[in-house]
Amino acid sequence: GIEPSASSVASENEASVNRVIHGSATAIPLPDAAVDAVLAIDCAYHFPPRSAFLREAARVLAPGGRLVMVDAVWDPSHLSRPARWFAHKALPALFRIPAANLGPLDNLLQACKEAGLHVEHTEDVTQAVVPGFHAFVQHWAAVGGSRWTKFRVVAGFLNKAVAWGLLRFVE
């Protein structure tokens, strides 16, 4: 794995059977064609910008290698003007998502193509992702008290964004 926090690398290597290296997903510290697979689950939409990660994934993948990712896509086009403002300003700030990463599935597919990646399959996995996250947060909010308040707020907004048809998770 790639870990941006140098202080976390040693502890993660102790706890994991896989090797963790210090680096950035947008500047992966590996040579060209070094790996057979890149796995990015529920994280690439946070990378500044996601397109740099896609280019790096394509660079480090060996011929025939695969990128497997679950990522968020946004489509506020059907929302009212105030709701679109909220979708483009408040939610990305709350979820720490760079503006360049906002957009519908077509934008993500185009970014993959521009990075030199061939997309074989997409599937909407929203209903597999969101309820589990919500249950996780609710559990820890009940046990962990006030320090989980922010996560409960995020989970509530996440549920609303999905209900409004604004946010989906795709693999």
Image (cartoon, grey):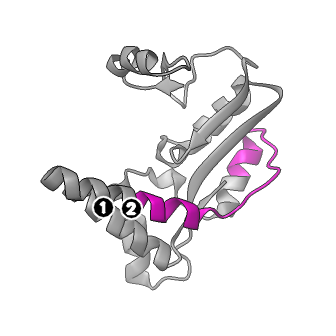
Q: Are marks 2 and 1 in contact (CB under 8 Å)?
A: yes
Dot 2, crowdedness within 10 Å: few (<14), some or many (≥20)?
A: few
Type of amino acid at the residue the image marks with label 2: Ala
The percent position of residue 143, horizontal first and vertical second, equals 21, 53
Point 37% across, 81% down: residue: 82
Residue 120 painted magenta: yes
Give SS at disc 1: helix
Q: Give the camera-side residue of 136 and 83.
A: 136
Point 57% across, 23% down: residue: 28
Point 76% across, 35% down: residue: 66
Type of amino acid at the residue the image marks with label 1: Gln
The percent position of residue 138, horizontal first and vertical second, equals 30, 61
Q: Give the camera-side residue of 163 and 92.
A: 163
Using the image, tell me which numbered label, if any, was put on residue 135: 2
Question: Quick check: 51 above or below 148?
Answer: above
Q: Give the camera-side residue of 138 and 39.
A: 138
Give SS at disc 2: helix
Dot 1, crowdedness within 10 Å: few (<14), some or many (≥20)?
A: some
The segment highlighted magenta reads: 110-134
Residue 106 painted magenta: no
The percent position of residue 164, horizontal first and vertical second, equals 48, 79
In this rendering, does residue 18 appear at all?
A: yes
The percent position of residue 20, horizontal first and vertical second, equals 50, 19
Q: Which residue is mark 1?
A: 138
Instruction: Determine the CA span between mark 2 and mark 1.
Output: 5 Å
Question: Quick check: 152 above or below 113?
Answer: below
Q: Give the camera-side residue of 96 and 142.
A: 142
